[in-house]
Amino acid sequence: MGSGKDDDSPKPSPGQKPRVLFGENAVAPVPSANPAIGPEPKVLFGSPQAPAPKSNQPKIIAAGQVRRRIACDAAALRAIDPNASEPILAQAQKLVDATNLDDHYFEDVVQFGAVLQARHASLSEDELNLASDPALARIRQLGSDFLVHLDALDPERVFAVQGGVLGAIRSIAGAGAGEALFSRHYAEIKALAAQLDALSPDVAALADNIRSLQRRYAQLAQDIDAHLLAAQFLIAHMCGIDPSDRERQAHYLSQLDALETRLASLSGTRISIDVAVQTIGAIRQMVDGLRLFGEDLVRSELPAWQAAYSAALAARAMEPGRAAGIPSLLRDIHRRMLTKLRPKG
């Protein structure tokens, strides 16, 4: 058992106050022997040591082995994909530089591109919400209704003149029918135009949503292209390891299957992105076309179309048996309206 006596640490001499490290009664630092450098710093525990000089050696190690950087440049990447753009080459090179194949947990390979597929899942949800948007369904219905009435008033069909006596009789009988047909469909078109005008805020919001989706899909496509290029380079690098380095070769080849699986998965995601971009592009074309159609319809197209149609019907009523032809103004306005409604391609 111990003697119960105090340790051998030096005891303060009579009249000497104990040192207080912190607080109001703290002992002032001991002045330095060299006044030019000021008081020396206090070291509370251990012995003072100078900081280690900065080293230029690799800082990343795995399982006791120093990580070897993978030699990669734009020329090597361009040899894999000659059509790759400069941003994709630069991004792919950063991905290769950041990938640690010496990690015994394979974390970089297992997680390669996983964040991109999470982004794709989020975008797919937003695309699904867009497709089920009630405003989009209403816009589609309005566009379809407009086309029905405009097709019914196609000047090529309404003003068609058939030859012979029977054709002349049909033309005479059809003069009044043409006016009634125009009146009925024109009233429907005006009602649809009013509905479209009331829906204009929803159309604008829908157009903004579509543009945002397109930008996000474009960025995701570029990021995946860079990952695909980097993955191909890494696979070639692992396959080309020096056979004499058996331990590293076995370590790299054990990651090869995982990276090839990631490459195939990212390739499938890239294909689905192309399909989504085409779908969203078609939706945007339809929405923009109907928006332009609605903006021009009430201000200029509809009044001009009505005037041209009425003039053509009046001319036919005066000479029903004569093929006077379709006024070019009416033909042009009608074609313009249909072009804005029908998707191109």
Image (cartoon, helix red, strand yellow):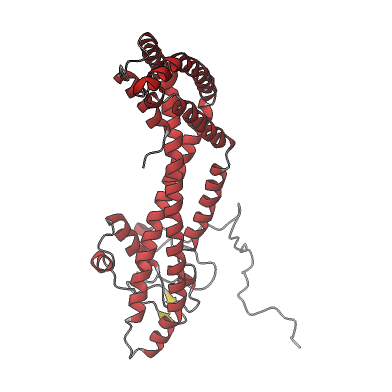
Above or below residue 140? Residue 61 is below
Quarter of the picture containing the C terminus is top left
Quarter-of-image position of residue 168? top left
Q: Nearer the viewer, residue 267 or 166?
A: 166
Q: Nearer the viewer, residue 159 or 194?
A: 159
Quarter-of-image position of residue 292? top left
**Residue 55 visible in rendering:** no
**What is the x, y in percent for residue 256?**
42, 78
Quarter-of-image position of residue 254? bottom left
**What is the x, y in percent for residue 43?**
50, 67
Above or below residue 121? Residue 320 is above
Relative placement, left or right, of 191 versus 254 is right
Across the whole image, how many numbered discs are drawn on residues?
0
Above or below residue 147? Residue 5 is below
Farthest-out residue, left: 75
Please name the residue shown 43% across and 72% down the image: 49
**What is the x, y in percent for residue 183?**
50, 15
Please name the residue shown 54% across and 70% down the image: 45
Please name the residue shown 25% across and 69% down the image: 76
Q: Nearer the viewer, residue 211 or 245?
A: 211
Quarter of the picture containing the N terminus is bottom right
**Residue 36 visible in rendering:** yes
